[in-house]
Amino acid sequence: MNPLEPSPPRTICLVDDDTSVLKAVSRLLTSAGFVVQAFSEAAPFLAYISANRVDLVVLDIWMKQMTGLEVLAHLCSLSPRTRIIIITGREDSVVKSIATQVGAVGFFLKPFDDEAFLAAVHHALGTAAEHGTKV
């Protein structure tokens, strides 16, 4: 690849069973130049990640069919280099501790600050944030 050419947009997987969160976070990430693969259930996401390289996953913890911690366990074995940012609607220090211990690079309580979230995404991917945002 020519170093003068811009790098292709990075794909981020978003896993959350709340469709309003999927739409809002997808819009936010897309507006920042990322390609988003959104999943409202864990099983299709796990199938996707077993066949595709994914640099970053934004993962909800409290989902109906499979908790985010269960997804996280599968994710760590299927794709150990994938970075993970946790989003959750419940304050839970035990979950935060477990997620951090297994390598989550960010933990956000919904609703979260868009700029802080995007800064964490850029940091996780090792990309420079645009629009003057510092990482």
Image (tube, helix red, strand yellow):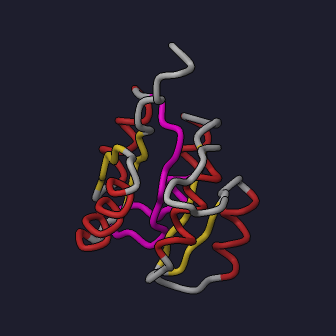
Q: Residue at x 64, y 37 (%)?
A: 80
x, y percentage for residue 88?
Answer: 49, 75
Compared with 63, 125 (above or below) is above
Q: Residue at x 58, y 86 (%)?
A: 91
Compared with 20, 48 (above or below) is above
**Residue sticking out furthest to the bottom:** 91
x, y percentage for residue 110?
Answer: 46, 81
Query: Which corner quadrant of the image does residue 40 belong to?
Result: bottom left
x, y percentage for residue 129?
Answer: 56, 54
Which quadrant of the rendered structure holds the C terminus? bottom right
Looking at the rendered structure, the number of numbered marks drawn on it comes to 0
Q: Residue at x 44, y 73 (%)?
A: 62
Q: Is residue 4 left or right of residue 92?
A: left
x, y percentage for residue 6?
Answer: 46, 29
**Residue sticking out furthest to the top:** 1
Which region is colored magenta? Answer: 53-72
Per the image, is 56 magenta?
A: yes
Q: Residue at x 30, y 56 (%)?
A: 41
Per the image, is 100 magenta?
A: no
| Nearer-the-camera pick, 106 or 74 | 106
Query: Which corner quadrant of the image does residue 32 belong to?
Result: bottom left
Q: Is residue 10 left or right of residue 120?
A: left
